[in-house]
Image (cartoon, rainbow, N blue to C red):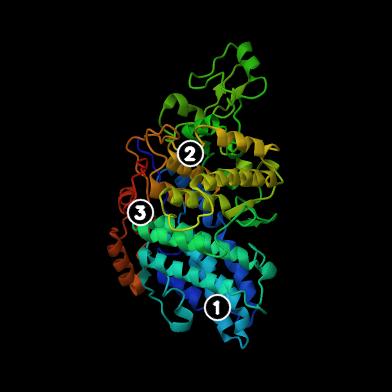
Amino acid sequence: MKKKFLYISIAAFLGLSSSCTNDFEKVNVNPNVVTDVDVRLLFTSSLVPIQTSRGGEYWNEGFTHFLSACQLVTGQSYAVATTAVNGRYRLFYTSVLPNLVEMRRLIALKPDKEKFEQINAITYIPQVMMALKVSDMNGSMPYTEANKGRDEGLYNPKFDNQEFLYTLWLKELSDAIVTLEKNASNQVNFGNNDVFFAGDVTKWIKLANSLKLRIAARIQNQDAAKAAKIFEEVMSDAVGPFSSNADQLIHKNPAYYPFGVDGYNIDIYSRHFAVGSAVEFLKSSSDPRLGIYYDKNSLTGSFQDTLTKYNKVLPSWIKMNDANIMYQGGPADFQSNPPVSTYFVNPFNAGGSNRYQLISTVNRKFFAPTVDQGSGTVVDVLFSYAEVCFQVAEFIQKGYGAKINTKGTAADWYNKGVRASSQSMNDIAIAANSTSYANIDARIDAHLANPKVKFDGANDLEKIYIQALLNLYRDPNEAFTLARRTGYPKFNSTLLAREVIADDLLPRRWWTLDPGEVNRANWTAAMTEQGFTPNDFSIEKLAKERIWFDKKSPDYGKGGN
């Protein structure tokens, strides 16, 4: 049975049902723009939309598309309908880019603009970070000519292709690093207007270097030599990328409700369930994130006494001697394997009035601390130190660091990544008043010693990919990008195997619609250059027609070295 894996929205997609130009005009020609402002306030306004959940990224894409494609989460199938996707595109052009561009324009007009050199350089870092997410799903995009309507009357920006954008973004990041590492005196500081790093210049340098690693990861299937060169630049830099969990990009705000004040938007469309292959891997590898990521089912407490009392036997796919019987997953395809999938929506009749939910759901409080009258706080890790560790480990394992001091072996970085991920996830769970562990360090030690995790020369690259994927459970866009570029989880793996789903098509990109007469020529040229069929966003096309970084990537489940 074919699983519908795509939701289509026209109205919610940057107003592009009429014309992309409409939005560029609104952004660029605004008679209410205030020119005499503290430019640091514009920076604050640009950071908030970058948070992981903005634009419906979790519920419209994260659970229903990205994490499902990675086979970490599953849910009911839905007809191709009106659910919004691609919210990052709208946010970038309406809320991120305009403020940053305006901030730089105002700085350039200041008589003492040399005092703003550092914060001017920093503006390019979140800009590149968000633009990269836009390009991850759309490929070519307006960038060099975007946001020029107000000052230059340009309402038909060209679409820059992804290969060019990567090169430009690497330069923008490198230039920012050079400026920030000058450590000039008498500089204006963001202070609390910087809701991420509170004006800490060193952390912005580390983020810029970490972003360069993200870009290198995307480039490597097209140009491994260039990816290796970027890696060498980052690791040779005086500051380098993130070096601990204390560096990672975090936003914590008690008044931040990504799933609504009561948290119930996390259940939009349906509850989201654990996939059996992921749960079994977490159980068999003694992973301390098992209870953090997924909720317990009903098989807790005295459930066995109840089964005995009413002479009931659990379905054969559940093993009674399983020490973690309270965690069970279902098939990756919600509609397949009926003996198991029937329990997604139907509880097990345990006799009398007892009804047991057998399949674990996503741990909702981990994402939405206020659900079910909870009182926890959301900690949004937008870029983790663990991600950096796994990326460095991958590059060293592939031989990219042969000419430089990589500050450790692939095993060293891998082990640091595993530890950092579990520690960070546990900290997030503590803040959320969700499932967490007081003895997390001992649990991590046991996990690292497990044969399915231990970096011991057997399937080491696959182990890096698996741990990197599990670390990205709260960063669906990056998880999806990893799955696309690597082809992992792979079929028939002895570690974490991808499930075969018959006749299933999974999209590998989103789309942009015809923007109308004003910019149709540039849009059409971009679609043609990328090999896309204009105005055809069927699942078949979105699965076959890939963006530049993805054109040489393996198919889902066909990962290699």
Is residue 99 in view from this perspective? no
Give the SS element for disc 2. loop
Residue 172 image point, x, y percent: 48, 71
Give the labeled residue for mark 1.
Answer: 104
Please name the residue that numbered disc 2 is placed on.
75
The disc labelled 1 sits on which kind of residue? Arg
Circle 3: residue type: Asn
Query: In percent of the image, x 59 and y 23: which residue is there?
Result: 323
- Give the quarter of the image for residue 502: top left
Image coordinates of residue 126 in percent, x first then y, are 54, 65
- Tell me which label, 1 or 3, sits earlier in the chain: 1
Disc 2 to disc 1, how far (Cα)? 44 Å
253 to 186, vertically: above or below: above
| Residue 196: image tag | none
Q: Nearer the viewer, mark 3 or mark 2?
A: 3
**Sequence order check: which comes first, mark 3 or mark 2?**
2
Percent x, y of residue 441: 66, 39
State the separation of the CA atoms marked 1 and 3: 35 Å
- Where does residue 430 sit, x and y in percent of width and height? 69, 44
Position of residue 135 in the picture relative to residue 377 (left or right): left
Q: Which residue is mark 3?
A: 221
Question: Nearer the viewer's eye, disc 1 or disc 3?
Answer: 3
Side of 94 where 558 appears, left or right? left
